[in-house]
Image (tube, rainbow, N blue to C red):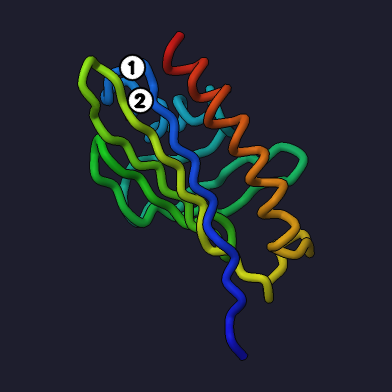
Amino acid sequence: METQNIPEIRKTVVLQAPIEKVWKAVATSEGMAAWWMPSTFEPTVGFEFTLHAGQFGDSPCKVKDIDPPYRVGFNWGKDWHLAFELKELEGGKTEFTLIHSGWDAEKVTEFGQPHAVIREVMNGGWENIVNKSLVHYVEA
């Protein structure tokens, strides 16, 4: 049976902050907790950590790649992959891109919801998290 791929979620924002500051926000557990979710994250390839997703419970995650200060990628739950990519811009600015992949129309989440449904919810959620929470945190 052929996999029904659902497009990845991509969110890009230009932050008025130097890349080192953005890196601390997206590649440390303290930073992530301030704009996204608390976790036991450590920036080490192969490190297994837990994302504390509030009402949705805890999700097991595993760091897949780290390239300071440009990229951090990890598996989230059983199907997803999340990557944060940073690009240094002139004038002390940083371009941040979030890529949430691993969507499959044939699959359901750990909570039994179809990926196609949850992707739409997550897409809206990421819109706010990246364009409001992350911006407020690193530009403060």
CA gap between label 2 and label 1 equals 7 Å
**Viewer-closest of 46 and 23:** 23
* Secondary structure under the numbered disc 2 in the rendered image: helix
Please identify the quarter of the rendering in which residue 53 is found: top right
Look at the numbered discs 2 and 1 and tell me whether their residues touch, using CB distance below 8 Å: yes
Q: For mark 1, give the secondary structure.
A: loop
Query: Given the image, on which type of amino acid does mark 1 rest?
Result: Ala
Residue 14 appears left or right of 113: left
Left or right: 25 as drawn, with respect to 65: right
- The percent coordinates of residue 69 (x first, y second) are 25, 35
x, y percentage for residue 41? Answer: 45, 40
Residue closest to the eye, 95 or 29: 95
Q: Farthest bottom residue?
A: 1
Within 10 angstroms of label 2, few (less than 14), some, or many (20 or more) residues?
Answer: many
Picture coordinates of residue 16 (x, y %)? 36, 16
Q: 2 left or right of 73?
A: right
Q: Which of the 4 image quarters holds residue 139?
A: top left
Query: Which quadrant holds the N terminus?
Result: bottom right
Toward the top, the furthest residue is 140
Image mark for residue 22: 2
First in sequence: mark 2 vs mark 1: 1
Q: Which residue is mark 1?
A: 17
